[in-house]
C-alpha cells in the first residue's frame, strides 16, 4: 500500500490520508469543497461546491497517476437530497464514463458543507 498526498487538494484534518493506493486501486478519502491554497470553503451553492469537490478529487487522482476517467465507484453525500438534480448536472460534466454511484442524504457534513464525495479508481498499468 502507498499513501497519496498532494498540495493540490485540501490538507487532511485528522488521522487519515487523502488517498491510498492498494495494488491498482485508488481509494480517496471524502472531499468537501475546500480550496486547497486558502483552506477556505468555496461557494454557497451546490453547483459551486460540487465543482470544487470534483477538482479536489481529480487533483488527488492525478497525483496517483490517474484521472476521473479511471473512477469506477463514487459515493456522494448531500446535506439536502433536494440538491440532487443540481449536483447531478455538474457531476455528469466531469464523470463521462458513468461510474457506479451511491448518493445519500447525510445528517451533517464537515464544516457544514453541502456535499462530500469519495471515489474508487483503477490505476491502469503502463
Image (cartoon, rainbow, N blue to C red):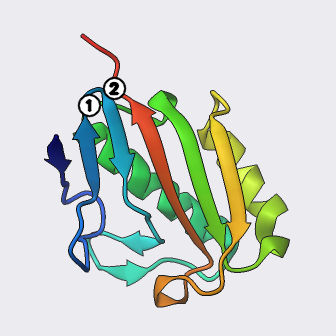
Q: How many marks?
A: 2
Residue located farthest toward the left when viewing the structure as drawn: 2
Report the quarter where the C terminus lies.
top left
Q: Secondary structure at mark 2?
A: loop
Q: Secondary structure at mark 1?
A: loop
Q: Give the percent coordinates (x, y) of residue 20.
A: 25, 47
Q: Give the percent coordinates (x, y) of residue 5.
A: 18, 54
Q: Is residue 49 above or below residue 64?
A: below
What residue does disc 2 label?
123
Whether residue 49 sits left or right of residue 126 in the image: it is: right
Q: Is residue 29 above or below residue 70?
A: below
Quadrant in the rendering for residue 56: bottom left
Residue 115 disc label: none
The residue at 79%/63% (across/down) is 84
Whether residue 16 sits left or right of residue 101 in the image: it is: left
Report the quarter where the N terminus lies.
top left
Bin the neighbour count of mark 2 within 10 Å (Cα to Cα): few under 14, some 14-19, many 20 and up: some
What residue does disc 1 label?
65
The residue at 71%/66% (across/down) is 104
3D distance between C-alphas at marks 2 and 1: 7 Å
Amino acid at each position: 500500500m502507498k499513501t497519496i498526498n498532494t498540495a493540490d487538494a485540501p490538507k487532511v484534518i485528522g488521522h487519515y490520508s487523502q488517498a491510498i493506493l492498494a495494488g491498482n486501486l485508488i481509494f480517496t478519502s471524502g472531499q468537501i469543497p475546500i480550496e486547497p491554497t486558502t483552506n477556505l470553503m468555496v461557494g454557497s451553492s451546490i453547483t459551486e461546491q460540487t465543482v470544487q469537490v470534483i477538482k479536489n478529487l481529480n487533483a488527488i487522482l492525478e497525483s496517483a497517476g490517474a484521472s476521473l476517467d479511471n473512477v469506477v465507484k463514487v459515493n456522494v453525500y448531500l446535506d439536502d437530497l433536494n440538491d440532487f438534480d443540481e449536483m447531478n448536472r455538474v457531476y455528469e460534466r466531469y464523470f463521462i464514463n458513468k461510474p457506479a454511484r451511491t448518493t445519500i442524504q447525510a445528517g451533517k457534513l464537515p464544516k457544514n458543507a453541502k456535499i462530500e464525495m469519495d471515489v474508487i479508481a483503477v490505476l491502469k498499468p503502463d
